[in-house]
Amino acid sequence: MRYSLESRFRGTIIGAFLGDLASGSKEQPKNWHEIALLGVESLITTSQLNLDDWICRQQVQFPHLDTSDGVSLKAIIATLPVALFYFDNTVKLRQNLSQAIAIWDRDLVVRDATLAVGYAIARSLTEKLDIKTLIPQTIDFIGETPTVLPQALLKVNNLLLQGAGLERVQGALSREEKLSKAVAMAFYCFLSTLEDFRLSILRATDNSDALSATGAITGALSGAYNSLTGIPVSWQMKLSSANSATSRLSNRKQMIELADGLVAVWSGAYDLAPYPKDLQQEGHAMSDKQGTLCVSAAPRVIRLR
């Protein structure tokens, strides 16, 4: 593999956060990322998508957060753990992404965007992403829908094949529905600068009219493809200065620990000892004589779902 799964999981989570920071959003950027990390904790603890457990954690952490009425595309960020955990099974990926996004937003464009982003991340993690075929395959994964997102993505695909520049693409999408345009621009910024995380984010946040979610989505897509290794260290260090404005969850070390824990649980062989105490206390596993909470399985044989 070009990059390890651990590094790609880390890159997805941290990339989304950095993309949001780069957009200069003042829309409580921490909340959706922290809800995503709560989702990672839930997946580690329950070894499957357990919506009741996830919602319970959210209510404890954010008792006054209202996610009931047309939130925004940023709700997609909350579903990133689901995309990571089910990346190797497209049937379960689609099913679980649809269930997860319905917690916060039932807008069909947001649902289709969630499926599109999740599928693209899965292609990166399986190392099957091809610039020329990703968007057509993504449209097939979305399936029949009344939204205009597939048409916006197809327009981006045609412009990519023509080698169109940023301004031309922005102009071509200017009349598209707002949410669809934001997602389409994220795909363009990612695919047009595939190997350069920094440039992808700068292009995604260059337009003052762009939704702040465009930067976060671009960061998740590019982070999954380029992994944490491909994110400049100077950018990663921005998380340290962001800590004072966010909770204990939104820091680089915690993100890395949770990403690694998610990979371990996905693989079917894991040890919760290095992870936060609340995960150890809530995990359903046998403990050894020294009280170390651990579970193990034969490599590549057992995968808990």
Image (cartoon, helix red, strand yellow):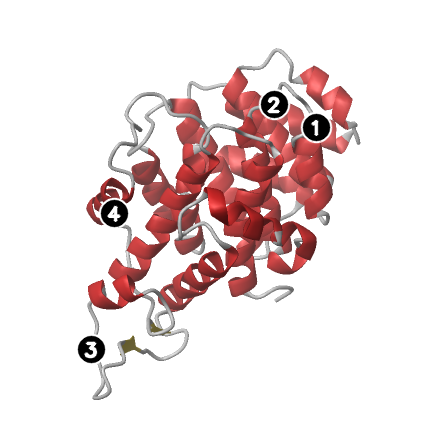
Label 2 to label 1: alpha-carbon separation: 8 Å
Circle nearer the N terminus (1, 4): 4
Residue position for label 1: 206
Residue type, label 1? Asp
Q: Is residue 64 left or right of residue 2?
A: left
Of 238 and 38, nearer the camera is 238
Q: Residue at x 33, y 44 (%)?
A: 96
Residue type, label 2: Ala
Q: Secondary structure at mark 3?
A: loop
Residue 287, percent from left and from top: 21, 80
Q: Secondary structure at mark 4?
A: helix
Report the disc number at residue 210: 2
Q: Mark 4 and mark 3: span between their CA atoms?
A: 23 Å
Q: Marks 3 and 1, how far apart in space? A: 51 Å
Q: Which mark is residue 112?
A: none
Q: Position of residue 286 (x, y in %)?
A: 20, 77
Q: CA distance from mark 1 to mark 4?
A: 35 Å
Q: Residues within 10 Å of mark 2 (few under 14, many from 20)?
A: some
Does 142 sit above or below residue 13? above
Question: Which residue is under mark 4?
Answer: 57
Q: Are marks 2 and 1 in contact (CB under 8 Å)?
A: yes
